[in-house]
Image: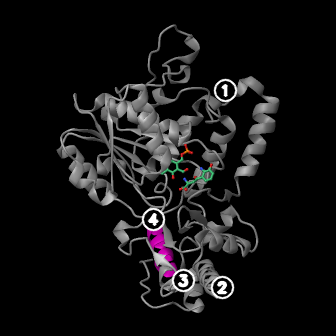
Amino acid sequence: MTTPVLSAKPALSTLLDLDARDPLQHKKAQFVLPEGVIYLDGNSLGALPATVPARLERVIHQEWGDALIRSWTAHAQEGRDWMALPDRVAAKLAPLIGAEASEISVGDSTSVNLFKALTAALDVASPGRRVILTDADNFPTDLYVAQGLNGLLDGRYELRRVPAAELSAHLTTDVAAMMVTEVDYRTGERLDMASLTAQAHAQGIVTIWDLAHSAGAFEVDLTAARADFAVGCGYKYLNGGPGAPGYLFVASRHLQARVALSGWMGHADPFEMARDYTPAKDARRFIVGTPTVLSLSALDTALDVFADVDLKQLRAKSLALTDTFMALVAGDPDLTLVTPLDHARRGSQVSFRHPQAREAMRRLVERGVIGDFRTPDILRFGFTPLYVSYADVYRAAQAVLDVAGELRA
Ligand SMILES: Cc1ncc(COP(=O)(O)O)c(C=O)c1O
Ligand SMILES: Nc1c(O)cccc1C(=O)C[C@H](N)C(=O)O
């Protein structure tokens, strides 16, 4: 299906027709969604894939309850040993982010992976450079991790924070690494990863991309963009569940970079119990401690939802849903769109400024339209193409207009 272009406000019948022809329509039934709720918050916590509860039951009762410690190595032939779980998840993640499984380490939170990525990036950066360049509006944890690491390094680096639109102009030869989030969590603006990475490389700068609001929402191609390092969340568009493990991407050309958190599970042979650390092959070396089996199992099953998904169709639907929502809400005097209209500059969310945004979102959630309020005045709506329909968008837009009207009255 090509992306439907909706310049005028579409009627519900038009949208029901789009739903009927949607090649991803069948995916919604693969999620557990409460009756009467329109869920526009999959960019904060993805919905529950219907197959996850049974998988967790099996892991808890059979693998933990019955097989006990044997499960770390049992059934390796059938791919069910716990030890290799991070590698199996990496293999499922690889096609979604355009990487080799051997370049992905699955585990720990995104924040911890940012620490690993930044220390590795600074290790391979051009010697003598002392600037970490970032978007001033980057997600707080990205900024805090950089501040914390710099403290550990006795403040050797300057964390240079500039508006996203000015990143290009700040790619100067004193910059060691550029650390940015591809899709802004507030505005939903998407940066051009391939272009910014190429510009950074031209100045000898290594790049770290945060894919929290990208992977699973649209096709990411780290290899084509020649990205150096990347991190991302398992619990947003990948639907791995609350606190799901995050991941770290290290381009194969950088696999020799410093492993700052050198734990035993990143050792080449953990059960050799050697006195000195010898890194495991590939990105597995960036795993620190014992894999979190329950949450990894949930993420492993959740990723199966993507097995038959054409990522081009996913992107087309995401753009069509966000276009539809923008068209339907356009014209309200109190809602100011902050998400770019240009498709190339848009992630999979739509955000508006509203003078009473917190109260507006409270009322929307009360009506079953779940989005987010983000400080200071942002109403944020995430569109997960796997389980949001065009009719959902229509109903959500009506609710937004009603609430905005109520608050004006
Ligand atoms: C861009 C970005 N990075 C990182 C995170 C989260 O990191 P963590 O999973 O460590 O809480 C989020 C959301 O929480 C985010 O939006
Ligand atoms: N990780 C979260 C959490 O533990 C509680 C509430 C929200 C979150 C989020 O993921 C926030 C999200 N990164 C954001 O873009 O705002």
Q: Looking at the image, do the residues carrying marks 3 and 2 touch, with CB atoms under 8 Å apart? A: no
Specify few, some or many for label 4: CA neighbours under 10 Å numbering under 14, 14-19, or 20 or more.
many
Q: Give the range drawn in magenta.
A: 312-325
Whether the residue carrying mark 2 lies under 8 Å from ligand 2 is answered with no
Residue type (three-letter) at the residue carrying disc 4: Thr
| Cα–Cα gap, marks 3 and 4 | 27 Å
Q: Earlier in the sequence, mark 1 or mark 3?
A: 3
Label 1 belongs to which residue?
A: 72
Q: Tell me the SS state at disc 2.
A: helix
| Cα–Cα gap, marks 2 and 4 | 24 Å
Label 3 belongs to which residue?
A: 18
Q: Looking at the image, do the residues carrying marks 3 and 4 touch, with CB atoms under 8 Å apart? A: no
Q: Looking at the image, do the residues carrying marks 1 and 2 touch, with CB atoms under 8 Å apart? A: no
Q: Which of marks 3 and 2 is nearer the N terminus?
A: 3
Q: Earlier in the sequence, mark 3 or mark 4?
A: 3
Q: Which of marks 1 and 2 is nearer the N terminus?
A: 1
> Quarter-wise, where is residue 387 in the image?
bottom right
Specify few, some or many for label 2: CA neighbours under 10 Å numbering under 14, 14-19, or 20 or more.
few
As drawn, the residue found furthest toward the top would be 275
Q: Earlier in the sequence, mark 2 or mark 4?
A: 4
Label 2 belongs to which residue?
A: 406
Specify few, some or many for label 3: CA neighbours under 10 Å numbering under 14, 14-19, or 20 or more.
some
Q: Tell me the SS state at disc 3.
A: helix
Residue type (three-letter) at the residue carrying disc 3: Leu
Report if residue 313 lies within the magenta region. yes
Q: Is residue 308 left or right of residue 61?
A: left
For the image, the number of numbered tags is: 4
Label 4 belongs to which residue?
A: 187
